């Protein structure tokens, strides 16, 4: 089925959607994005994603393309037109098309580009991987210093994913100064003696929307949370590990650098948090 996508005010068949070759997103990765999950045709934590989008745009001095209400309406229209039951809505805003290539930012007359499309993933909440857990390798984090801004500079994370595949694993956790920053497209956690340990927020990691929700639910369930950096050695010696992201929810991690974590099976904390996250997010989905 050919999708209907959104480009700068228009809903178009995907084959007719066009962006200029001078768009700064294409030439300079000068853009930001968000991915919002859809379950049962409803958006999960839309408010969280729109707040982070506004922050990313502000940090890069890119104009806001439209109001939050308009953004929500476009998300819903795309979900409806593409009959998405489970899946996601991808949104990208770039600094736009100045009509030429120039390192300097264009003036205010150049409007940002707004592109959105859907991806269907039937039954995504029932992922087989969540039942077995996934394997990660560790790689050096060589990304830039503002990982808190959700830019479309995803080359190194893509390379990390390929390094993981080549090593027979599913994903890579990045390490800087001996400590895990985050996964290629997710926030990383370990559990030791019932305590959930995850790196604190800073410019070093993306401020995951799922992370915020999961830490809130963990606190509500009286689980202990410690926000601090951890090492790969600690991960290997942990009772369990997991990661979070908008599209994978809470995903158990059962192996790091070929060493089994805990029993080598998804642990009770990750399993419980996944259940709570799915249950609570469905309740507030819009
Ligand atoms: N870190 C990185 C580097 C990511 O790309 C993502 C997912 N976009 C996350 C963390 C998780 O963020 P969220 O829970 O908002 O999807």
Image (cartoon, grey):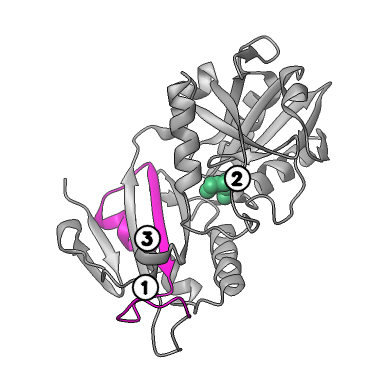
Identity of the residue drawn at 57% across and 72% down: 60
Q: Secondary structure at mark 1?
A: strand
Identity of the residue drawn at 67% across and 25% down: 241
**Who is closer to the viewer here, 29 or 284?**
29
Answer left or right for 272 relative to 2. right
Q: Image quarter for residue 20?
A: bottom left
Which residue was labeled with disc 1?
113
User: Residue 227: image x %, image y %?
Assistant: 81, 42
Q: Residue 142 — which label?
A: 2
Can residue 72 be seen in the rendering of this structure? yes
Q: Residue 155 — which label?
A: none
Identity of the residue drawn at 44% across and 66% down: 72
Give yes or no for contact between labels 2 and 1 (Cβ–Cβ under 8 Å): no
Which residue was labeled with disc 3?
76
User: Residue 200: image x %, image y %?
Assistant: 77, 47
Q: Which residues are magenta?
A: 75-104
Q: Is mark 1 within 8 Å of ligand 1?
A: no
> How much space separates mark 1 and mark 3, taking CA atoms?
19 Å
> How much space separates mark 3 and mark 2, taking CA atoms?
37 Å
Q: Is residue 20 above or below residue 86?
A: below
Q: Image quarter for residue 81?
A: bottom left
**Who is closer to the viewer here, 155 or 219?**
155
């Amino acid at each position: 089925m050919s999708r209907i996508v959104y480009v700068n005010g228009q809903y178009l068949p995907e084959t007719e959607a066009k962006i200029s070759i001078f768009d700064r997103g294409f030439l300079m990765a000068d853009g930001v994005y968000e991915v919002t999950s859809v379950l049962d045709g409803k958006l999960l934590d839309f408010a969280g994603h729109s707040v982070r989008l506004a922050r990313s745009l502000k940090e890069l001095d890119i104009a806001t393309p439209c109001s939050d209400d308009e953004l929500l309406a476009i998300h819903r229209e795309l979900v409806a037109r593409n009959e998405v039951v489970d899946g996601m809505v991808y949104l990208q805003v770039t600094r736009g098309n100045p009509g030429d290539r120039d390192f300097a930012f264009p003036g205010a007359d150049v409007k940002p580009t707004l592109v959105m499309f859907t991806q269907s993933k039937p039954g995504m909440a029932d992922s087989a991987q969540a039942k077995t857990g996934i394997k990660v390798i560790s790689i050096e984090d060589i990304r830039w210093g503002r990982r808190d801004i959700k830019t479309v500079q995803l080359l190194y994370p893509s390379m990390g994913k390929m390094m993981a595949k080549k090593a027979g694993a599913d994903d890579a956790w990045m390490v800087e100064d001996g400590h895990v920053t985050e996964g290629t497209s997710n926030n990383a956690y370990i559990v030791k003696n019932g305590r959930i340990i995850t790196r604190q927020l800073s410019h070093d990691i993306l401020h995951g929307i799922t992370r915020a929700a999961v830490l809130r639910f963990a606190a509500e369930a009286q689980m202990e949370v410690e926000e601090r950096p951890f090492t790969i050695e600690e991960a290997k010696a942990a009772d369990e590990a997991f990661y979070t992201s908008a599209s994978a929810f809470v995903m158990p991690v059962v192996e790091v650098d070929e060493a089994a974590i805990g029993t080598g099976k998804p642990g009770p904390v990750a399993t419980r948090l996944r259940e709570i996250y799915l249950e609570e997010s469905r309740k507030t989905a819009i």
